[in-house]
Image (tube, coloured by chain):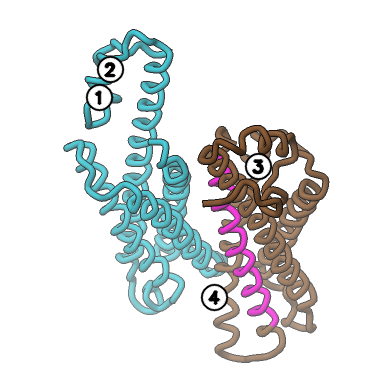
Chain colours: A cyan, B brown
Amino acid sequence: MSNPDDPTLKEATAPPTAAGDVENQTSGTGFGVSEIVTRWRREDVLKRGSLALRVFGLLFSLLAFIIMASNEHGNRKDFDKYEEYRYVLAIAILSSLYTGLQAIRQVYELWTGRQSFPRRNLALLDFFGDQIVAYLLLSSASAAVPLTNSMRENVDNIFTDSSAAAISMEFLAFLSLAFSALISGYKLSNQSYI
Amino acid sequence: MSNPDDPTLKEATAPPTAAGDVENQTSGTGFGVSEIVTRWRREDVLKRGSLALRVFGLLFSLLAFIIMASNEHGNRKDFDKYEEYRYVLAIAILSSLYTGLQAIRQVYELWTGRQSFPRRNLALLDFFGDQIVAYLLLSSASAAVPLTNSMRENVDNIFTDSSAAAISMEFLAFLSLAFSALISGYKLSNQSYI
C-alpha cells in the first residue's frame, strides 16, 4: 500500500513527536507500519481538507458580508430597512469571525507543528462550532430568499441583484461549513484512537 | 464499573447472537468483560435514544403537516396562496415519511432482533438522511418566519396563529433530527468497531 522508507512520505505524514524513532524501530515488520502510515496519511488529508473548507467558508462569508454591507442605494433600497437582510449581514460577520479564527489557528498548528489547545476540548469546539455556524448560515439564507424573490417579481435593479449575490455567497459558505462539520464530527468520534 | 453477573443487566444489554455463551466463558476475567458490557450498554442507550428522537421527529412533523394543511380560511387566508407555506407543508410531509419509515424499521429490528439491511449502507443512509432532513426542516421554517411576522404586525387571527404553530412544530422536528444526526454520525464513525 505505502512504502515506509520513502523520505517524502515520512515527512509529509509524520506527527510531531518521535515519529522517526517508531519508523526506524519497526520498519522490518511491514504490515503494522504500513497501516500506521496509512492512518497518518488519512489524518493529514483530513487536516488539509478541513483547513481548505474553512478557508472557502471564510472567503464566501467575507464576500456575503461585503456585498450586503455595501448594498445601500438610498430611499427604500437600503439593506438595513429589511430585517431579513440585517440577519444575513449579522450571520455573515459571525461566520467570517469564526472561520477566520479557526483558519489562523490551523495554519499556526500546521506551521509550527504544535498543539494550541487540549485536543479533546478542541474537537468538541470544532464540531459544534462548525455545525452551529452551518445551521445559522442556512437559516439566514433561507429567510432572505422569499423577500428577494418577491422584490424581483416587480423590479430588477442593482439592489435586488446584490441581495441575491449575498444570499448565494452565504449558501456557498453554508456548504463549506457543512462539509467541514462532517470532517470535525469524524475526528470527534475517533479521537480516542488517535 | 458494571457487574457482568447481574442477570437484569445481561438481559438489557445482550446482543442477539450468542451473548450468553460469551458471558459464561469469560466471566472470570473481569476487566475485559466489563468493558464489553459497558460498550453494549452504551450502544443500547444510543439505539433507544435514536428511536426516541425519530419518534419525536415524526410527531412534530405530523403536527406541522396537519396544522398547515388545515390552515384554509377562505379569501387570502389560505396557506396555498403563499409559497413559503407550501414549502413548509412539502417538507413536513417529506419529514413525516422519512421519520415514519425509519421508526417502523427500528421498532421491527428491536422487536425481532434481526438486521433488516446491511449495516454499512444503513449507517450511511441513516446519517445523511437525518442530516439532510434536518437542513430542509430548518430551511423551510426559516423561510416562513418573516412572512408570518409581517402578517402578525397588521392582523392577528386564526390564520397567522396556525402558521406560527406549524412553524414552531417544524422547528422542534428540526431539533429532534439534528440530535438524531449526531447519534447517527457517531455510529457511522465507529461502525468498524461494533
**Mostly what secondary structure, the magenta segment?**
helix
- Which residue is more in the foreground, A167 or B129? B129
Write down the residue under mark 4: B146
Q: Are marks 2 and 1 in contact (CB under 8 Å)?
A: yes
Q: Which residue is mark 2?
A: A23
The percent position of residue B137, horizontal first and vertical second, equals: 61, 61
* Secondary structure at numbered mark 2: helix
Please identify the residue farthest to the left as the structure is shown: A112
At 56% across and 33% down in the image, what residue appears?
A: B192
Question: Marks 2/1: CA distance?
Answer: 6 Å
- Magenta stretch holds residue B113: no
**Numbered badge on residue A137:** none
Query: Which chain letter matches label 4?
Result: B
- Quarter holding residue A47: top left
Mark in front: 3 vs 4: 3
**Foreground: disc 1 or disc 3:** 1
State the image coordinates of residue A143 (x, y, percent, origin top left).
52, 67
Segment colored magenta: B162-188
Which residue is labeled 1 in the image?
A19
Look at label 1 and name its amino acid.
Ala
- Report the residue at 42% width, 52% height from top: A127
Is residue B128 visible in this depiction of the protein?
A: no
